[in-house]
Image: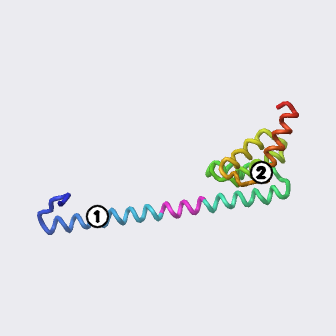
Amino acid sequence: RRLIAVRTRGERCRIMKAVKVIVAIAAIAFAVFVVYHFQQRRQLAQWNNQATQLIGQERYDEALPLLEKARAKDASNHVIWKNLGTVYDGLGRPKEALEAYQRSLGINPQQPEVQRRVEELRKELKAAGA
């Protein structure tokens, strides 16, 4: 069965042209999405890499805004959360460090070093009465 009753060859040609235009627009939209997505991923990687270098130099206050920007763009990235935990830890903010580490583990539980730090922070916070 036909969905659209086409009476003339001219109508068929107009419909086919319209379909081609719609397909072309969809292809362009998809290409724009792909380019945007990869640019976002590249930017996230740059922020995270810069923050990682700063963490290695114990420049936590400079790493924090980079990681906060990265987290705002992708809150499902366990590495960003782990690095945020490290920064908060280095800045002497154990409650925030614990929360960030827990978020990282919630996304990827296969991080034994993060799990160990979570346990240590829980003990420290409990001992401090926090």
Q: Quadrant of the N terminus?
A: bottom left
Foreground residue among 80 and 27? 80
Indicate the position of residue 95 as horizontal and vertical percent values.
Answer: 78, 38
Question: Is the magenta region chiefly helix, strand or loop?
Answer: helix
Residue that badge 2 annotates: 114
Foreground residue among 96 and 45? 96
Query: Can residue 77 be found in the magenta stretch?
Result: no
Q: Nearer the viewer, mark 2 or mark 1?
A: 2
Residue at position x 81%, y 50% from top? 60
Residue at position x 84%, y 48% from top? 90
Q: Are marks 2 and 1 in contact (CB under 8 Å)?
A: no
Task: Please tell me whether residue 107 is drawn above or below residue 34 in the rendered image.
Answer: above
Residue at position x 62%, y 51% from top? 74
The secondary structure type at the circle numbered 1 is helix
Indicate the position of residue 111 as horizontal and vertical percent values.
Answer: 74, 54
Label 2 crowd bin: few (<14), some (14–19), many (20+), radius 10 Å? some
Indicate the position of residue 39 as horizontal and vertical percent values.
Answer: 58, 62
Horizontal side of 83 relative to 24 (left or right) equals right
Label 1 crowd bin: few (<14), some (14–19), many (20+), radius 10 Å? few
Give the magenta range. 32-40
Horizontal side of 23 relative to 77 (left or right) equals left
Q: Report the amino acid beneath label 2.
A: Val
Q: CA distance from mark 2 to mark 1?
A: 53 Å
Residue that badge 1 annotates: 19
Q: Report the amino acid beneath label 1.
A: Val
Residue at position x 15%, y 67% from top? 10
Indicate the position of residue 58 as horizontal and vertical percent values.
Answer: 85, 54
Total tally of numbered discs in the picture: 2
Which of the 4 quarters of the picture holds residue 56? bottom right
Q: Earlier in the sequence, mark 2 or mark 1?
A: 1
The secondary structure type at the circle numbered 2 is helix
